[in-house]
């Protein structure tokens, strides 16, 4: 780490993260590096610590010890807003979208655009600006919605995922974390979301994507590297071009030497 | 949901969103119809007693008090919360206000003789004190619910008893009747342009403000978001606890405002008369199309819904039926509405 200058430091480096809930140790010195322009998969059995690690990186969980550095600068996240302020956006497994709100209200929730002048000071929303920006984003993701005015609850699973991803890339962030983005989807919608991730990777080279998944074929389809977690530690980081699904499974289960 | 995710479609096509049901677009349609039918029936069978100008005036004044409480209650119910203590907060506010008015408006001898040389100052300080008590009562509810995370239902059930008890302790169980009459002349019985009672104007202004906030502002959208997905709202950076705290505090303030209308109308507190207020306000909100499950709500529906409790109450009296039937009918209507809401929720 000391040999890195800020310029060549990885986009994200987490080191020696520990987190215990009572006597249950969720993270036991987990470390991970993410570089700009890569899609980095995070795999592991249930309870291996993937979700907790992601929550630490996105500021939802404060670790007991360990360091997080963005571009080589040490940071400490206490709230999700701290992580967001330095460009970490997360699409949660449960999407965390409000089903009763429409697409643009969800995209701008917490960061609403207000009208200018007196109306803005009264807190009046600029719906037109939010709608057109959201339409732009969804178009750039190649995701079609019939109307950005309908509650997201009336959308299909794939459409909801698209709204959640649009929200996370709306803010020009550096790191996009996707927690099981295809878990609840049908086959065509899975493919749509994977295409969307591939597209992001091509078109936003300044960004790093961290993808948590159980779906190993997806890892080989879209990830550049893959980190395997077991018992709260990152036990291996492999290039997808230099490994096999068989090797990966062995690493996840601990069967590998 | 499963049927749609299984259906094959081109990969980039995200599918057609579902059409919104009729009831979502016109949430207050049923209750508006029920209200119109009630008014027609009561007007037809009471030889004009129901539809007389002075009677309609009374109905509107009752409805105004319900509406003032029901507007912030709409916001609370949108967050899937509830406030059962509004009637008791109203009583406590009016008792404190009446007490302060009596202290400030003249010497004890003058006030006892219904003379109020300092009525102006007395009324202003009394109203300020009453509104502050309402705000404080609501803030205590909000603190317990939002920050200590106690269930709203039980907290406000407890304070419903507690606030009324405090008011009765202050008055020894009787009503305070030394309210300067100028309050009635200039507000409680006054009319804008000689037509619309001032308390009704006040209620409509509050409803308009509530509609504007819910429909057009950041606060309104965040209220809906909290009711829809509280964890999602938190992760989006919204200060959920503080937001919920203010909703309860402002509902207490609104109950205080309704309490001031009580004093202005009757020149007296009504310490035993408000046990029904929470049911009336919650009915108004739910009948107006706001979902008890959170995330869905509107103010125009609440405005229409606020008329039903007082129309029923008054109509039964004019029909020479026991007015005690009002809560019975309201309960039946409310349960039907909740049943419909629940079915809609289950999809």
Image (tube, coloured by chain):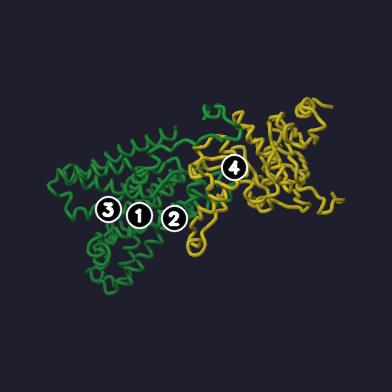
Chain colours: A yellow, B green
Q: Which residue is mark 3?
A: B62
Q: Which residue is mark 1?
A: B68
Residue B345 versus residue B338: which sits nearer the camera?
Answer: B345
The earlier-in-sequence mark between 1 and 3 is 3
Q: Are marks 1 and 3 in contact (CB under 8 Å)?
A: no
Q: CA distance from mark 4 to mark 1?
A: 38 Å
Between circles 2 and 4, the one closer to the viewer is 4
- Could you say where residue B83 lies in the image, as x and y percent from the top left? 41, 48
Residue B130 versus residue A176: which sits nearer the camera?
Answer: A176
Chain letter for the residue marked with disc 2 in the picture? B
Between circles 2 and 1, the one closer to the viewer is 2
Instruction: Report whether mark 1 lies on the same chain as mark 3.
Output: yes
Q: Are marks 4 and 3 in contact (CB under 8 Å)?
A: no
Between circles 2 and 3, the one closer to the viewer is 2
Between circles 4 and 3, the one closer to the viewer is 4
Q: Is residue B339 left or right of residue A57?
A: left
- Could you say where residue A13 lies in the image, as x and y percent from the top left? 77, 46
Q: Secondary structure at mark 4?
A: helix
Picture quadrant where residue B122 is located: bottom left
Q: Is residue B234 left or right of residue B197?
A: right
Q: Secondary structure at mark 3?
A: helix
Q: Residue at x 65, y 46 (%)?
A: A89
Residue A23 seen by the camera: no
């Amino acid at each position: 780490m000391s040999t890195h200058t800020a310029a060549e430091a990885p986009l994200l480096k987490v080191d020696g993260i520990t987190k215990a809930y009572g006597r249950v140790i969720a993270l036991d010195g987990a470390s991970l590096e993410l570089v700009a322009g890569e899609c980095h998969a995070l795999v592991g059995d249930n309870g291996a610590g993937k979700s907790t690690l992601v929550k630490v990186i996105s500021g939802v969980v404060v670790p007991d010890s360990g360091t997080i550095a963005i571009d080589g600068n040490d940071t400490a996240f206490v709230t999700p807003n701290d992580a967001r302020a330095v460009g970490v956006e997360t699409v949660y497994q449960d999407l965390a979208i409000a089903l009763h709100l429409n697409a643009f209200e969800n995209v701008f929730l917490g960061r609403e655009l207000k009208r200018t002048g007196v109306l803005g000071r009264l807190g009046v929303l600029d719906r037109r600006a939010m709608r057109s920006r959201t339409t732009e984003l969804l178009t750039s993701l190649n995701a079609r919605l019939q109307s950005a005015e309908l509650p997201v609850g009336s959308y299909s699973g794939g459409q909801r995922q698209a709204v959640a991803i649009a929200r996370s890339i709306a803010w020009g962030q550096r790191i996009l974390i996707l927690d099981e983005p295809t878990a609840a989807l049908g086959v065509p919608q899975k493919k749509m979301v994977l295409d969307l991730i591939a597209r992001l990777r091509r078109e936003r080279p300044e960004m790093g994507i961290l993808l948590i998944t159980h779906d190993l074929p997806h890892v080989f389809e879209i990830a550049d590297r893959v980190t395997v977690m077991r018992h709260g530690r990152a036990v291996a980081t492999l290039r997808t071009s230099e490994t096999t699904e068989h090797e990966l499974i062995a690493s996840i289960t601990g069967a590998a030497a | 949901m499963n049927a749609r995710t299984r259906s094959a479609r081109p990969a980039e096509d995200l599918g057609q969103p579902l059409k919104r049901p009729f009831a979502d677009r016109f949430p207050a349609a049923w209750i508006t119809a029920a209200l119109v039918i009630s008014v027609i029936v009561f007007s037809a069978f009471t030889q004009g007693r129901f539809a007389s100008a002075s009677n309609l005036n009374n109905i509107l004044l009752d409805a105004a008090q319900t509406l003032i409480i029901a507007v912030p209650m709409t916001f609370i119910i949108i967050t899937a919360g509830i406030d059962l203590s509004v009637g008791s907060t109203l009583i406590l506010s009016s008792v404190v206000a009446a007490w302060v008015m009596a202290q400030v408006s003249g010497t004890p001898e003058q006030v006892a003789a219904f003379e109020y040389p300092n009525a102006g100052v007395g009324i202003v300080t009394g109203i300020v004190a009453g509104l502050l008590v309402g705000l404080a009562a609501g803030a205590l509810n909000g603190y317990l619910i939002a920050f200590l995370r106690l269930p709203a239902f039980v907290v406000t059930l407890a304070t419903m008893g507690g606030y009324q008890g405090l008011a009765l302790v202050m008055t020894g169980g009787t009503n305070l009747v030394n309210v300067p009459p100028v309050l009635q002349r200039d507000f409680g019985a006054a009319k804008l342009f000689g037509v619309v009672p001032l308390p009704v104007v006040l209620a409509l202004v509050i409803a308009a403000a509530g509609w504007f906030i819910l429909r057009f502002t950041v606060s309104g959208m965040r209220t809906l978001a909290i009711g829809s997905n509280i964890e999602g709202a938190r992760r989006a950076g919204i200060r959920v606890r503080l937001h919920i705290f203010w909703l309860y505090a402002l509902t207490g303030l609104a109950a205080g405002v309704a309490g001031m209308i009580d004093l202005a109308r009757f020149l007296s507190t009504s310490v035993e008369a408000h046990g029904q207020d929470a049911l009336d306000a919650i009915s108004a909100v739910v009948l107006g199309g706001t979902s008890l499950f959170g995330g869905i709500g509107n103010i125009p529906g609440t405005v229409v819904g606020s008329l039903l409790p007082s129309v029923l109450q008054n109509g039964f009296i004019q029909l020479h039926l026991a007015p005690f039937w009002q809560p019975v009918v309201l309960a039946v209507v409310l349960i039907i509405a909740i049943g419909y809401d629940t079915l809609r929720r289950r999809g």
